[in-house]
Structures are given as structure tokens and as C-alpha cells.
Image (cartoon, rainbow, N blue to C red):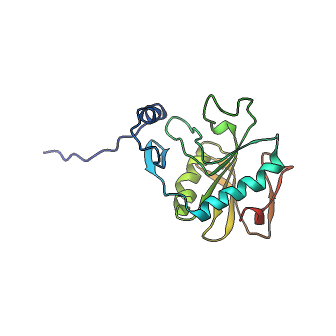
Amino acid sequence: MVAVFPQKHLTDIAEWHRMGEAGIFPPDARLELIDGEILHMAPIGFNHAGHVARLIHALTPILHGKAIVNAQNPVQLGDLSEPEPDFLLLRPDPDFYTTRHPQAADVLLLVEVSDTTLRFDREQKRRLYATHNIPEYWIVNLIDNCLEVYRQPQHDDYLSKTLLTKADSLNLAALPEARVAVADIL
């Protein structure tokens, strides 16, 4: 007798969208498609939500007209992943991405706010974003009260990693004229 092991059923973006349109998932479900797997995401707590609001408040005024600020909405990465990052800066688009989800080439900055998901964001999501050439990835690390900045994607990782505290500031890689005080987002 040959042993048979259960196999995962991986899905792609097209099937993922069909499942959503068919109402397979409850409307309040927090799900992401990552590398073909449907993942349940943790509920958003008040500290997490407040830090997303801080990002929006700090970055929107300095980027007006230079980028589109987007929060907790999908970005399509290839055929197998459609995460919903906490914060995105996107290339300007005349229709504000109303006819399609942004794709990797549209992303200037992608940010995850992390407390309970820190390990997942550091490992799996970092590799996912680097693989798709997201030029700059930040983790607002609520556990260690710091900002992790990843730049220079190569293959499935970033060549540059910087840890910043409230005393620091930084310029965005894609928009170097935009300077951000880390204290404004932590």
C-alpha cells in the first residue's frame, strides 16, 4: 500500500477573486492571499489602528500630489499573492486605482504595523515583498518601539536593513525630498 498524504490546495488571484464575488467568505473576514494560501489575519487592535492613523497623518501632508496614500487595501503581487498592507504609498494614477488593484510596480513604499504578527512580517512578508521588488518596506515594530526599514530588494530579501528610533528621521527612497520624523509615526 502506498502512503498518501494530504495536499494543500493553492489558489491564484483569479480563483481568489471568484471566491470573493461568490460570497464564500463572511463580509467581515480578514483574509489575505499569500503565496497561494488563504490566511486568516488577526483582528486589528486599537494600538495597531492608531499607528496606521499616525502614518496617514504624518505622511499625507508631505506627499500631497507626489504619491497616493492608501491604507489596508489590496496590492496584487504576481498571480498568487494579494496582501492588504497596513499602509502604501503608490505612484500617482489619474483614476486612483479604481479600475484595478495596484501592483508591485505601482508601490513606492509598503508598511506593516506589527505587534502580534511581527515574526510573520519580518520573515514571510519581507521575502514576499523583496521577491516582487517592492523598493522600500517598513515595519512599525510596536513590540520593540522602533521602525525597521528595508531597502534594495534582491531576489527574496533586502540588502539594506536599518533600525530607527523616535530620535531618528529618514528620507523616502523613492521621494528623497520627503523627510519623515520617526517620532511622528511611533
The structure residue drawn at horizontal position 78% and vertical position 45%, both measured from the top left corner, is 174
**Which quarter shows the C terminus?**
bottom right
- Residue at the far left: name it: 1
Q: Position of residue 178 (x, y in %)?
A: 84, 51
Q: Position of residue 8 (x, y in %)?
A: 34, 44
- Up/down of 27 relative to 115, above or below: above
Expressed as whole percent of the image width and height from the top left, the position of residue 42 reads: 49, 57
What residue is rendered at 17% in x and 45% in y? 2
Residue plotted at (64% across, 31% down): 98
Q: Nearer the viewer, residue 11 or 45?
A: 45
Give the left or right position of residue 102, taking residue 82 as reference.
Answer: right
Give the quarter of the figure containing the N terminus: top left
Q: x, y (%) of residue 80?
A: 49, 38
Query: Is 46 situated left or right of 35 in this image?
Result: right
Q: Is residue 92 visible?
A: yes
Q: Is residue 160 visible?
A: no
